[in-house]
Image: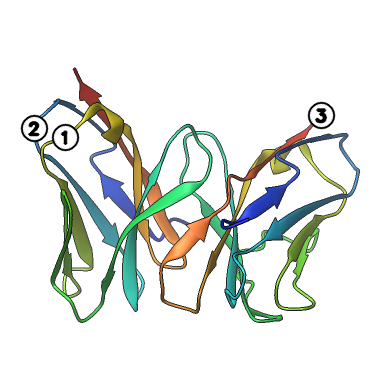
Amino acid sequence: GAGVSQTPSNKVTEKGKYVELRCDPISGHTALYWYRQSLGQGPEFLIYFQGTGAADDSGLPNDRFFAVRPEGSVSTLKIQRTERGDSAVYLCASSARENTEAFFGQGTRLTVV
Amino acid sequence: SQQGEEDPQALSIQEGENATMNCSYKTSINNLQWYRQNSGRGLVHLILIRSNEREKHSGRLRVTLDTSKKSSSLLITASRAADTASYFCGDKIIFGKGTRLHILP
């Protein structure tokens, strides 16, 4: 597809479980960003990849959160031992390179019960 | 912690009027992007202004940037019902909770 694709669109999981959220960026985009957004709040920056490497992971809230982008394309956000407070919409964006127009996916709505 | 904010938090105007919203930030930026968000899902990129630019236009949108004051403004002229949305600014980091714009028919 032409846009950023995120799967699944919705995920319900039990507290304590492990989840993986996937982001397929626009083909050829080297920069990839993850955010999470709670109701009524702005998107909270989590991590930024330039190619395969995490150029800035300062937004990851704790060590339960981890993200990878092994081949410089698809990225997976991994959350261990999920907590109810992790419930949010997780957004992914990509751009051709840093400091250029960013395109967002539709997000994954994660609900931890 | 919040790296900036948009104001006002909410704005209701009549269709056809102009809407102005402001963004202030705390960090250094290379560029500033304005986004629109409908229904709490993906953000749509509206316009990008670089740190060495002071003003930029795109259709009905006009963005200004004052790096000395660390502030930017977004003007939407001749507003339409379809402009009803939340608006955010930021670079890599999205600043603040956004401005909720409601266009009244």
Question: In the picture shown, does residue B78 fall above or below A29?
Answer: above
Residue extending furthest toward the front: A1
Amino acid type, label 3: Val
Q: Which residue is mark 3?
A: A113
Q: Which quadrant is home to the N terminus of chain A?
A: bottom right
Q: Are the residues tagged 1 and 3 within 8 Å (C-beta)? A: no
Q: Which sits in the foreground, B62 or A41?
A: B62
Alpha-carbon span between mark 2 and mark 3:
44 Å
Q: Position of residue A44 (x, y in %)?
A: 53, 54
Q: Residue at x 77, y 78 (%)?
A: A71
Mark 2 chain: B
Residue extending furthest toward the top: B105
Q: Is residue A76 left or right of residue B10?
A: right
Question: In the picture shown, does residue A84 fall above or below A98?
Answer: above
Amino acid type, label 2: Glu
Nearer mark to the viewer, of 1 and 3? 1
Q: Position of residue B29 (x, y in %)?
A: 34, 75
Asked which secondary structure carries label 2, the reply is: loop
Q: Residue at x 50, y 36 (%)?
A: B40
Q: Are the residues tagged 2 and 3 within 8 Å (C-beta)? A: no
Q: Which residue is mark 2?
A: B17
Q: Position of residue B28 (x, y in %)?
A: 34, 77
Mark 3 chain: A
Alpha-carbon span between mark 1 and mark 3:
41 Å
> Which dot marks residue A22?
none
- The crowding category of the residue bearing disc 3, from other C-alpha atoms within 10 Å (few below 14, some 14 to 19, many at least 20), is few
Mark 1 chain: B
Whether callout 1 and callout 3 share a subunit is answered no
**Residue A79 lies in quadrant:** bottom right
Q: Residue at x 17, y 76 (%)?
A: B53
> Which dot marks residue B79?
1
